[in-house]
Image: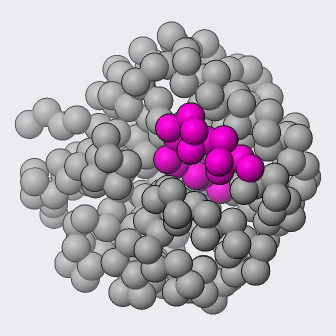
């Protein structure tokens, strides 16, 4: 069976600074080459925010804005292949609110992946971030976020914003994964993308589906830092899953939450 595959978790790039692959000199760099490479694996659409080595560890809204602009530029280059995500930052409430307004006017509905450690912040539960999320909620934006170490912070964020469609990134090891499943019980709008660590554990996805339902799990790889082929194989070849479940994970859930 052929599956449509949407990679919900990527970080598109257009130069060495925005390419976070550790072997970036050895992968296709230009837009055409990257699209050809991804389509060669069966991926027909990618989503996500631009990150940059230059910005690593710094709280700098100018850099955030440049990366958000770059996401819009890449959207021009990639067309329908790319659903841009943008960054916000709790140390810059006014600027973040303006950025949400600007992106809303551009028709952009995806925030993130937010990667706090990359942008020099660390608290999903702070008042400032909550204020920014209130506006994201008003515009029905989807919030994709990197799983941080403090689970209580993420619980609080989700409890306070039960209307927001959250997509947490990275299942992680068992204790972390179980906390994700608990948050799915806090809010029916809480989802998990399969990128990063976790999926290689035998039975993880079957367990999650049995406990919380297949509609909570979204295919993602973290390209270009991770190899999408590993994650495609982890779903496609898993005989613990039905074809219908694979179809829902590979594309239907992303289409539903992003209204594609
Ligand atoms: Zn991440």
In the image, residue 122 above or below residue 113: below
Residue 167 picture location, percent across and down: 47, 62
Is 240 a magenta residue? no
Residue 76 visible in the current orientation: yes
Residue 105 picture location, percent across and down: 57, 39
* Range covered by the magenta-colored residues: 98-114
Residue at figure coordinates x 51%, y 12% from the top left? 33
Is 109 a magenta residue? yes
Left or right: where does residue 6 sit relative to residue 85?
left
**Quarter of the view holding residue 185:** bottom left
Residue at figure coordinates x 22%, y 66% from the top left? 214
Between residue 56 and residue 91, name the one nearer to us: 91
Quadrant containing the N terminus is top left
In the image, residue 185 above or below residue 129: below
Residue 74 picture location, percent across and down: 60, 23
| Ligand 1's quadrant | bottom right
In the image, residue 222 above or below residue 174: above
Between residue 221 and residue 142, name the one nearer to us: 142
Residue at figure coordinates x 52%, y 63% from the top left? 138
């Amino acid at each position: 069976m052929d599956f449509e595959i949407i990679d919900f978790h990527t970080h598109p790039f257009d130069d060495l600074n925005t390419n976070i692959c550790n072997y970036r000199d050895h992968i296709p760099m230009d837009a055409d080459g990257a699209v050809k490479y991804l389509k060669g694996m069966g991926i027909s659409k990618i989503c996500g925010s631009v990150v940059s080595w230059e910005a690593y560890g710094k709280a700098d809204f100018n850099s955030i804005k440049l990366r958000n602009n770059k996401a819009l530029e890449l959207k021009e280059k990639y067309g329908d292949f790319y659903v841009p995500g943008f960054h916000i930052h709790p140390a810059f409430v006014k600027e973040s609110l303006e950025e949400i307004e600007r992106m809303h006017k551009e028709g952009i509905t995806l925030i993130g992946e937010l990667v706090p450690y990359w942008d020099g912040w660390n608290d999903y539960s702070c008042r400032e971030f909550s204020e920014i999320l209130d506006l994201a909620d008003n515009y029905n934006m989807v919030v994709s976020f990197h799983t941080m170490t403090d689970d209580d912070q993420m619980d609080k964020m989700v409890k306070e914003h039960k209307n927001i469609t959250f997509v947490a990134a990275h299942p992680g090891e068992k204790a972390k994964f179980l906390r994700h499943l608990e948050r799915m019980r806090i809010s029916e709008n809480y989802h998990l993308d399969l990128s990063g660590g976790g999926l290689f554990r035998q039975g993880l996805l079957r367990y999650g589906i049995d406990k919380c339902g297949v509609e909570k799990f979204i295919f993602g790889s973290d390209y270009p830092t991770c190899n999408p082929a590993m994650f495609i194989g982890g779903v496609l070849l898993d005989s613990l899953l039905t074809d219908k479940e694979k179809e829902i994970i590979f594309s239907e859930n992303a289409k539903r939450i992003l209204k594609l």
